[in-house]
Image (tube, grey):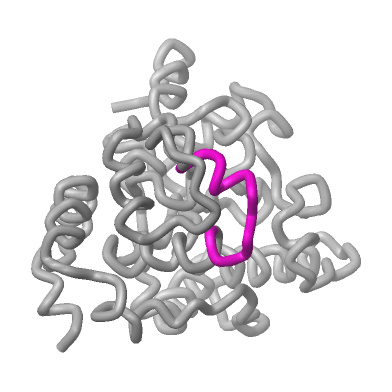
Amino acid sequence: MAITKEKIEEFYKFMSPREFEYHIHISPLNKYIYFEVPKAACSTIKATLQELEAKTLGLEIPSKEMSVIHNKKLSPLKSPSDIGLDEFLAMLNAEEIIKFCFVRNPYTRVMSAFLSKLSWKNSSYKQQINQILGLTEETITFAQFIEAISKTSPKEMNPHWRNQTHQLFGELVNYNFIGRLENLNQDLEQILKKIYKQEEGRINNSGRLTGSEKKLEEYYDEEIEKKVRKIYEEDFKRFNYPEELSKLKQ
């Protein structure tokens, strides 16, 4: 079913207009739209796409500094408002436009968000969690973090731990390709070949690694696993990830 101007408001059920602008990356020239999921290799994917886009446009290759990769104003890729609502809707509805995203196992994604955001001593993130729980803690535990998320609506969640189903707008977008962080290199190469019709450039491995896959037993107990499974129930089902944490540890 085509997405109309009347339906565009439905996108804002999942995130704010500012986030909507920030997390959608458009190439009118190379005919694709990348929908970003934070904590699912988005730094690597954006750095790779920005470099290839700059090359095809004859622009200077963007810096690989994190501050540049995540600065939308410096990216050669467009936001919906850059191309206008009519053109954005046309691209969303056009079969020849590739709409793609990358997802990640909810257990490791939410733990990676905790390890990267709260372990950086970032006061704003700690303030968010403390405000939700009515605490004034200097150090937030993983259990407290998950408890705070369980009390937050998807739209109000920080995009780094928002349900991927909502981050990707549920049923609104008809994706041509859904890659997985767990198979990043192969899946990203596949989508690059689909876009460019041949191998061009290389995957730009950027981003901060938290090593979350190796820390599951350190952070998860039965109660936390149960809460994460409930919070991200739609993600487990939609993206076919096993709900049992024990299967991930194997």
How many labels sit on residues?
A: 0
Examine the rendering and report whether any part of residue 35 can be seen.
Answer: no
In this image, 81 relative to 75: left or right? left
User: Which residue appears at 45% of the width and 61% of the height?
Assistant: 114
Picture layout, residue 108 above or below residue 103: below
Query: Could you say which is closer to the camera, residue 61 or residue 67?
Result: 67
| Residue 210 location (% of width, % of height) | 49, 77
User: Which residue appears at 62% of the width and 30% of the height?
Assistant: 18
| Residue 60 location (% of width, % of height) | 90, 67
Where, by quadrant of the figure, is residue 186 drawn? bottom left
Quick one: which residue is furthest to the top in this view? 6
Which quadrant does the N terminus fall into? top left
| Residue 34 location (% of width, % of height) | 52, 53
Which quadrant does the C terminus fall into? bottom left
Q: Magenta span: helix, strand or loop, mainly?
A: helix
Examine the rendering and report whether any part of residue 249 can be seen.
Answer: yes
Magenta residues (range): 118-129
| Residue 14 location (% of width, % of height) | 40, 30
Picture layout, residue 97 above or below residue 15: below
